[in-house]
Structures are given as C-alpha cells and as structure tokens.
C-alpha cells in the first residue's frame, strides 16, 4: 500500500508514522523546519502507549512521490480548494482521498440519498471549488478521535485516543476502506469502518461547533468553559440546536449533552485547535464547523438562533484576525 500524507502536521505525521510502522510505503509532505527534522531524524512519536520513530520518506514536492493508493489529507479544510497543484501528482484513476477534517465535509451529500442528494454545501465548497480539486467520488470520510500536537520539528506528542473512524459516502463497506482499516490497525490505531459515518461526523461536531468558537472568543480552555455557568448554558443550547439539525437530516448522535459536557470537562485545561490557531495568527477553521450547520439549518427549516449569533460574532473575529 502506497500512502501520501499531504499536510504531515501533528495528526498527519502521527498517522503516517503508524502506517509506516505497519509496513506501508509512506510519503510525508510538509515544509519548513518540520520537514527538515523529519528528513534528518524521521518522525519521533512520544506517546503514553510507547514512543517510537518512523523514518518514512519526507518531501515538499509531491512530484517526487507520484501516484499513490491513498492520500491522507492532514490539511485544514479551508486549504482544500487551493491544494490542487499538490494533490494532482499523487492521483491515479482509483486513488482514494481520506479527509481527516472536523465539521461538515464537502462530500456530505454525495450519494446521500433522499431529498438533498447531491446538494452542495456552499460554506464548505464555495462555487464548487473544493469538489473541482477533490472529486467526491474519491472521498473516504474520516472522523478523528485522537489528540496530538507538534512538540517540536519532527516530534509528535500523542496525548490521547487512537480511533480514526472511516466510511464511504454511500454507506457501503468497501474493499478500499477495509484495506485502509487493516493497515491502520496493524500500525497500532483503531480504525472501524462505519456503515454511516455521518453519525460520527455529528457526534464530533457536537463539541467542535460549540467549544471551538467560544474558546476563541473567550480565550478559554475546555475546563474553564465547562465550569463557567453562563458559558456552559450557551454551549448546551448550541449543542441542542445542532442535534436538531442532525435529526432533521436523519442522523442519530447517540449521546446526551450532559455526557458530552462531562467528557469535555475531563479533558482539563486543553486549548481547542481554533484557540491555538488564533494565538498563532493562523486562519480560523470555522466555516465547516459553524457556518455549514447554519446553512444546513436553513435547508431543513430548523431554528438555530444561538448558532447564528455565535457564528456572526466569531465570523467577525475570523475576519479581523486574518486582516
């Protein structure tokens, strides 16, 4: 199995290292000091499950790699539309693209069935710019339940979780999903093939849609948001509205809001990825988390006043931080 990791940051390098350990032919695409460190020393993974080093090929030029069986996308979703020159050299006729993103993916309604089949979500695929680069037919969905961070160039700190749920947009259990799952499991990860990954998407989104924008607006950690009475109530309302949209689209999350909040509180003083991006002056990945659900509420006729309010304020924050 030949795999390219496009955007080999904390999650991408971790997955690439695991697959390399399992014997896959792995190629990591990155840049800057992180790339230089991986070239010289490999990827060093520091984990409570055991440290290891993977010396996979690392480059900033996808043309060196050529076509692969799987492209694992470790890029932020707001970078997808511009990644064409990077991903094109990696594709052959049957290359699968595994999109490890939070929020609503560009392929969400591809082979969805029902009244919204084929609908394009404008906030995540504006004017079809993402679909033009990443054909929905290539997509394998991936919901990440692992927490990692770059401790330094070439060094990935694995904090918790090893589950990467994957699934086909058409809900089939395909050979390509089973092959990828087998390789991921051989590398020490959990990788269930879910018949309907959209349920997992909404489960993960339940936390991201609320904690991520609020953390950036309040400069607060997970624990701080959960312990502040007023903020906790706002998050509960945002989760309730999100569940209503999910249910209108036929999805079942299967977890109570109180349980979801309790789990978040246990994470402790963790800063969400959105807060980290804000602090580092990076673009905020809020369209796929918040704007998309507001858009889906419109097409399903669900009232989401609190999501709309938080979206308006956090959108202004994103615009100002990008200026």
Image (cartoon, rainbow, N blue to C red):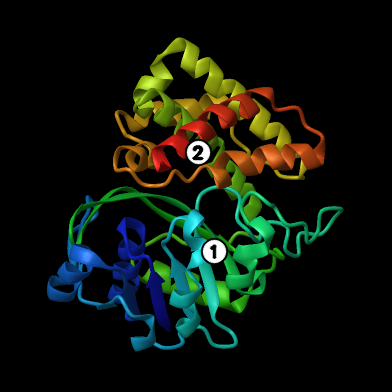
The C terminus is located in which quarter?
top left
Decide which of 312, 147 is in the foreground and name it: 312
16 on left or right of 50: right
Closer to viewer: mark 1 or mark 2: 1
Q: Check disc 2 and report its element: helix, strand or loop.
A: helix
**Image coords of residue 119 (percent x, y):** 77, 57
**Residue 179 appears at what percent x and percent y?**
51, 77
Q: Earlier in the sequence, mark 1 or mark 2?
A: 1
- Residue 172 seen by the camera: yes
User: Looking at the image, which residue is at 82% across and 53% down?
Assistant: 116
Find the residue positioned furthest to the right. 115
Label of residue 175 in the image: none
- Percent x, y of residue 223: 35, 24
On the image, which quarter does residue 75 sit in? bottom left
Marks 1,2: beta carbons within 8 A = no
- Label 1, residues with CA under 10 Å away: few <14, some 14-19, many ≥20: some
- Left or right: 301, with 131 as reference point: right
Q: Secondary structure at mark 1?
A: helix
- Front residue of 8/200: it is 8
Q: Residue at x 33, y 40 (%)?
A: 276
Looking at the image, is 64 positioned above or below residue 116? below
Side of 205 relative to 22 (left or right): right
Residue 207 in the image: above or below residue 200: above
**Residue 208 numbered mark, or none:** 2
Residue at the far left: name it: 40
Q: Nearer the viewer, residue 295 or 57?
A: 295
Marks 1 and 2, how far apart at CA = 22 Å
Q: Residue at x 72, y 65 (%)?
A: 170
- Quadrant assignment, res 8: bottom left
Q: Which residue is mark 1?
A: 81
């Amino acid at each position: 199995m030949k795999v390219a990791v496009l955007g080999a940051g904390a999650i991408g390098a971790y997955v690439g290292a695991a697959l390399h350990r399992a014997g896959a032919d792995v190629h990591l695409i990155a840049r800057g000091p992180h790339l230089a460190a991986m070239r010289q020393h490999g990827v060093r993974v520091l984990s409570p499950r055991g440290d290891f080093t993977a010396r996979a090929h690392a480059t900033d030029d996808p043309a060196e790699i050529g076509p692969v069986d799987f492209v694992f996308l470790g890029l932020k979703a707001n970078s997808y539309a511009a990644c064409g020159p990077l991903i094109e050299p990696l594709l052959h006729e049957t290359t699968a693209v595994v999109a490890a993103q939070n929020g609503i993916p560009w392929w969400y309604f591809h082979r969805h069935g029902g009244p919204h089949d084929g609908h394009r979500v404008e906030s995540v695929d504006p004017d079809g710019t993402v679909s033009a680069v990443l054909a929905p037919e290539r997509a394998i969905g991936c919901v990440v339940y692992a927490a990692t961070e770059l401790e330094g160039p070439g060094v990935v700190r694995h904090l918790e979780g090893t589950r990467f749920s994957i699934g086909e947009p058409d809900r089939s259990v395909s050979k390509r999903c089973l092959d990828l799952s087998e390789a991921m499991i051989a590398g020490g990860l959990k990788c269930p093939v879910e018949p309907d990954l959209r349920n997992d998407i909404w489960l993960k989104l339940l936390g991201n849609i609320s904690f991520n924008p609020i953390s950036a607006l309040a400069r607060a950690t997970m624990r701080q948001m959960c312990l502040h009475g007023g903020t906790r109530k706002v998050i509960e309302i945002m989760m309730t509205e999100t569940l209503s949209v999910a249910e209108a689209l036929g999805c079942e999350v299967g977890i109570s809001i109180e349980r979801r909040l309790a789990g978040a509180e246990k994470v402790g003083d963790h800063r969400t990825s959105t807060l980290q991006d804000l602090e580092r002056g990076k673009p905020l990945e809020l369209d796929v988390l918040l704007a998309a659900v507001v858009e889906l509420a419109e097409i399903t006729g669900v009232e989401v006043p609190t999501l709309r309010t938080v979206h308006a304020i956090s959108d202004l924050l994103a615009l100002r931080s990008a200026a």
